[in-house]
Amino acid sequence: MMKWRAVKASRVLKALFSIGWRVNRQRGSHRILKKAGYPNVTFAFHESEEIGSRMLSRIAKHTGLTPEDL
């Protein structure tokens, strides 16, 4: 099982961009991200917020993100 540690939302978003995710549309702090071969993902965090390990593992399940990407 992979170990996740809490990180800022801005760092997670940057990591998602680096593995091919792009912003499809945005309304307020809710960003709809898209990547070919994956369903759209809603990223609803302010950039200064810290995302905990459980939420990171849920994000990873839907996006293919790994701890090494961060």
Image (cartoon, rainbow, N blue to C red):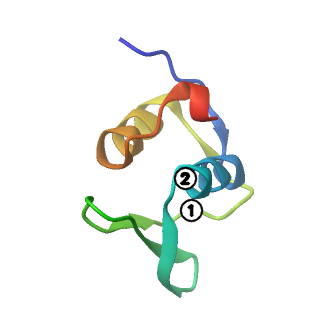
Q: Compared with residue 52, is residue 43 higher up or lower down, i.e. above or below?
A: below
Give the number of the mark in front: 1 or 2.
Answer: 2
Residue that badge 2 annotates: 16
Work out which residue is located at the far right of the displayed protein and give it.
48
Label 1 element class = loop
Question: What x and y, as percent, mark residue 5?
Answer: 59, 24
Question: What x and y, as percent, mark residue 65?
Answer: 46, 39
Question: What x and y, as percent, mark residue 41?
Answer: 35, 64
Q: Earlier in the sequence, mark 1 or mark 2?
A: 2
Label 2 element class = helix
How crowded pointer 1 is (Cα within 10 Å; few <14, some 14-19, many 20+) is rated as: some
Residue that badge 1 annotates: 45
Q: Amino acid at mark 2?
A: Leu
**15 vs 31, nearest the viewer:** 15
13 sits left or right of 10 in the view: left
Quadrant assignment for the C terminus:
top right
Work out which residue is located at the far top of the displayed protein and give it.
1
Q: Compared with residue 53, is residue 59 higher up or lower down, i.e. above or below?
A: below
Q: Residue at x 49, y 15 (%)?
A: 3
**35 vs 46, nearest the viewer:** 35
Q: CA distance from mark 1 to mark 2?
A: 13 Å
How crowded pointer 2 is (Cα within 10 Å; few <14, some 14-19, many 20+) is rated as: many
**2 vs 54, nearest the viewer:** 2
Q: Amino acid at mark 1?
A: Phe
Quarter-wise, where is residue 35 in the image? Answer: bottom left
Whether label 1 touches label 2, CB < 8 Å: no
Question: What x and y, as percent, mark residue 67?
Answer: 54, 26
